[in-house]
Image: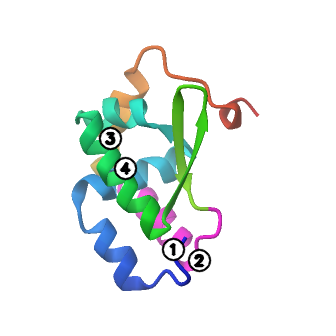
C-alpha cells in the first residue's frame, strides 16, 4: 500500500466507472473473486484484472489467493475517511449498483470464501 493515500489518488482511481463499480461492489459484499466481478460487471476477465491491479497498486484493494481463486477486499489499512466515504457512497447509490448486484446474486456456482462462511 502507498505510504499515504491522498484524496487525489483515491478520486483518480474511482473516477473510472469500472473501478468505481467494482470497488463499491467489494465494499458492499466484503470480498469478491475475479470471476464474481466478471459476472457482476459483465466484462472480460483481462479488463477486470487490469482495473483490479490499478486499485491494488493504489492501496485501495488487497488480494489473496485461495486455490484457483483470487479474492479482493478493501485494504484493511485504508484511512478511516476512505472507508467512511465508500460506505456512504454504497448506501446512497443502491440503485446505481442494482444491475451489477442482481447479476452477482443470479450467478450460479459462486466460489465460497472462508470469510463468507465465518
For the point 46% across and 59% down, the residue is 56
Residue 22 circle label: 4
- Please say whether residue 67 is visible from this viewpoint: yes
79 left or right of 42 in image: right
Residue depicted at x 31% and y 43%: 48
Note whether 56 is above or below 112 in the view shown.
Answer: below
Placement of 108 over or under 96, stated as above or below: above
Quadrant in the rendering for residue 65? top right
Mark 2 Cα-neighbour bin, 10 Å: few <14, some 14–19, many ≥20: few
In-front residue for pair 104/31: 31
Q: Residue reaching furthest top?
A: 109
* Callout 4 touching callout 3 (CB < 8 Å): no
Q: How far apart are marks 3 and 2 (CA)?
A: 27 Å
The N terminus, quarter of image: bottom right
**Nearer-the-camera pick, 33 or 66:** 66
Q: In this view, does 47 lie to the left or right of 113?
A: left
Q: In this view, does 13 lie above or below 56?
A: below
User: Mark 2 or mark 4, which has the lower sequence index?
Assistant: 4
Mark closer to the chain start, 3 or 2: 2
Horizontal side of 27 relative to 45 (left or right) equals right
Magenta-drawn segment: 76-94
Q: Distance between the residues labelled 1 and 4?
A: 15 Å
Q: Distance between the residues labelled 2 and 4?
A: 19 Å
Label 3: element kind: helix
The nearer-to-camera label among 1 and 3 is 1
Q: Residue 82 carries which label?
A: 1
Element class at badge 4: helix
- The residue singled out by tag 3 in the image is 98
**In which quadrant will I find the C terminus?**
top right
Amino acid at each position: 500500500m502507498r505510504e499515504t493515500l491522498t484524496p487525489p489518488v483515491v478520486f483518480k482511481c474511482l473516477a473510472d466507472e469500472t473501478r468505481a463499480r467494482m470497488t463499491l461492489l467489494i465494499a458492499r459484499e466484503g470480498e469478491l473473486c475475479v470471476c464474481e466481478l466478471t459476472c457482476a460487471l459483465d466484462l472480460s476477465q483481462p479488463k477486470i484484472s487490469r482495473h483490479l491491479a490499478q486499485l491494488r497498486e493504489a492501496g485501495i484493494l488487497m488480494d489473496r489467493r485461495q486455490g484457483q481463486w483470487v479474492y479482493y477486499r478493501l485494504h484493511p489499512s485504508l484511512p478511516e475517511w476512505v472507508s467512511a466515504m465508500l460506505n456512504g457512497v454504497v448506501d446512497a447509490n443502491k440503485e446505481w449498483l442494482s444491475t451489477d448486484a442482481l447479476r452477482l446474486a443470479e450467478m450460479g456456482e459462486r466460489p465460497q470464501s472462508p470469510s463468507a462462511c465465518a
